[in-house]
Image: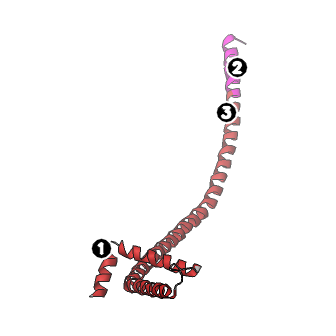
């Protein structure tokens, strides 16, 4: 065998080993690609229904939030109406009731003076009633003159 033939034989053996190694690598690579394909298809099969369910859940939550928004607006309107009604009732009945209570207290005090009894209320209920009447009178006296309540009072008085 000559040197050229020996070199050719070595090159042939080298190429055979190289091709064998490349074949093994390609076989392993094809297995990995098959597993990746199976994995991607499984993820796709499971992800599409999950995304559909998530979209439905978001839509349902949005509808519920819209309903809550409407309820909140209605409650705010009802609270405003109740506030206006209580202000109107206080303006309409508050002043005369305070005056009647003060008058009745004055009459009781005058009667008590004539009978010689103590001039201050002695019963706890009378004291609480007197304190409530005084607080109501102070509130009526310090009420703002340019607000809704004063407009209602002026409208009621004529």
Front: mark 3 or 2: 3
Question: Would residue 15 be counted in the magenta stretch?
Answer: yes
Of residue 75 and residue 36, the one placed in the foreground of this image is 75
Q: At 29% from the left edge and 87% from the top edge, which residue is drawn? A: 157
Residue tagged 3? 22
Give the quarter of the figure containing the C terminus: bottom left
**Of helix, strand and loop, which one carries label 2?**
helix
State the image coordinates of residue 32 (x, y, percent, origin top left).
67, 44
Front: mark 1 or 2: 1
Label 3 crowd bin: few (<14), some (14–19), many (20+), radius 10 Å: few
28 to 7, vertically: above or below: below
**First in residue order: circle 3 vs circle 2:** 2
84 to 22, vertically: above or below: below
145 to 117, vertically: above or below: above
Residue tagged 1? 145
**First in residue order: circle 3 vs circle 1:** 3
Question: Would residue 85 be counted in the magenta stretch?
Answer: no
Of residue 6 and residue 134, the one placed in the foreground of this image is 134
Tell me if 141 is positioned left or right of 66 in this view.
left
Residue tagged 2? 9
**Of helix, strand and loop, which one carries label 3?**
helix
Magenta-colored span = 1-17
Label 2 crowd bin: few (<14), some (14–19), many (20+), radius 10 Å: few
**First in residue order: circle 1 vs circle 2:** 2
Quarter of the rendering containing residue 14: top right
Q: Would you say the magenta stretch is mainly helix, strand or loop?
A: helix
Q: At 65% from the left edge and 48% from the top edge, which residue is drawn? A: 36
């Amino acid at each position: 065998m000559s040197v050229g033939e020996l070199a050719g034989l070595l090159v042939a053996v080298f190429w055979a080993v190289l091709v064998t190694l490349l074949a093994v690598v390609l076989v392993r690579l094809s297995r990995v690609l098959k597993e990746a394909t199976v994995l991607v298809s499984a993820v796709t099969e499971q992800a599409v229904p999950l995304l559909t369910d998530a979209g439905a859940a978001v839509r349902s939550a949005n509808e519920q939030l819209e309903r809550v928004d409407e309820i909140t607006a209605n409650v705010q309107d009802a609270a405003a109406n109740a506030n206006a009604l209580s202000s109107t009732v206080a303006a309409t009945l508050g002043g005369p009731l305070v005056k009647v209570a003060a008058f009745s207290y004055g009459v009781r005090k005058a009667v008590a003076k004539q009978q010689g009894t103590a001039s201050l209320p002695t019963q706890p209920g009378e004291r609480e009633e007197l304190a409530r009447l005084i607080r109501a009178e102070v509130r009526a006296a310090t009420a703002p003159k340019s607000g809704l309540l004063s407009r209602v009072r002026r409208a009621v008085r004529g």
